[in-house]
Image: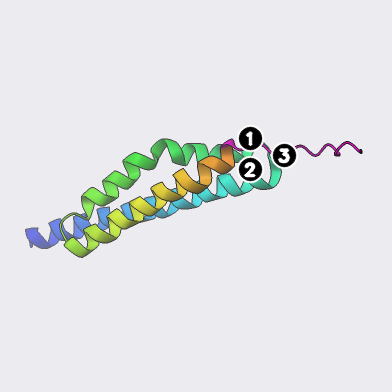
Amino acid sequence: MAEYDLRLARDSEIDEAIEVVAALAMDLETGVRGFQITREKSFLEPYVRAEERRRADLDRFVALEREDPLDAFVAERARDRIDAWTRDVARPLVTRRRPSTAPCPRR
């Protein structure tokens, strides 16, 4: 019975970590999307909060999934994809300056 209870507690911990990672990815994307649409920095709040906790949340998820090789592979892949999206998509969009809307000078 004790082994069952330990497994149940571990599974609950993993379920919670999955929910945290899903919310993290959604917050990253929501903040970038809102900022891209409005160019108002206040819309970056979900992105900034998620970016502050991204490494710890993803590393915790991967650590919890280490017991099973397939689960570990999936967790590491999810971490790598979220990291790549943040590096290759989110940061450039958040730091890119919007092109000027001033009319081009006539010749």
Q: Position of residue 88 (x, y in %)?
A: 48, 47
Secondary structure found at label 2 = helix
Lower position in the chain sequence, tag 2 or tag 3: 2
Lower position in the chain sequence, tag 1 or tag 3: 1
- The Cα atoms of the two marked residues, 2 and 3, are separated by 15 Å
Secondary structure mainly formed by the magenta segment: loop
User: In percent of the image, x 91 and y 38: which residue is there?
Assistant: 106
Q: Is residue 96 magenta?
A: yes
Q: Residue furthest front?
A: 107
Task: Name the amino acid, label 1.
Answer: Lys
**Pointer 1 residue:** 41
User: In percent of the image, x 38 and y 51: which residue is there?
Assistant: 21
User: In percent of the image, x 68 and y 40: which residue is there?
Assistant: 39
Q: Quadrant of the C terminus?
A: top right
- Measured along the vertical axis of the image, is residue 33 above or below residue 40? below
**Pointer 2 residue:** 35
What is the span of residues highlighted in magenta in the rendered image? 95-107
Task: Name the amino acid, label 3.
Answer: Pro
Q: Is residue 46 visible?
A: no
Task: Name the amino acid, label 2.
Answer: Phe
- The crowding category of the residue bearing disc 1, from other C-alpha atoms within 10 Å (few below 14, some 14 to 19, many at least 20), is few
User: In percent of the image, x 48 and y 37: which residue is there?
Assistant: 49
**Pointer 3 residue:** 99
Pointer 2 and pointer 1: residues touching (CB < 8 Å)?
Answer: yes
Q: Is residue 33 left or right of residue 4?
A: right
Q: Is residue 61 left or right of residue 10?
A: right
Q: Is residue 72 left or right of residue 44?
A: left
**Residue 104: quarter of image:** top right
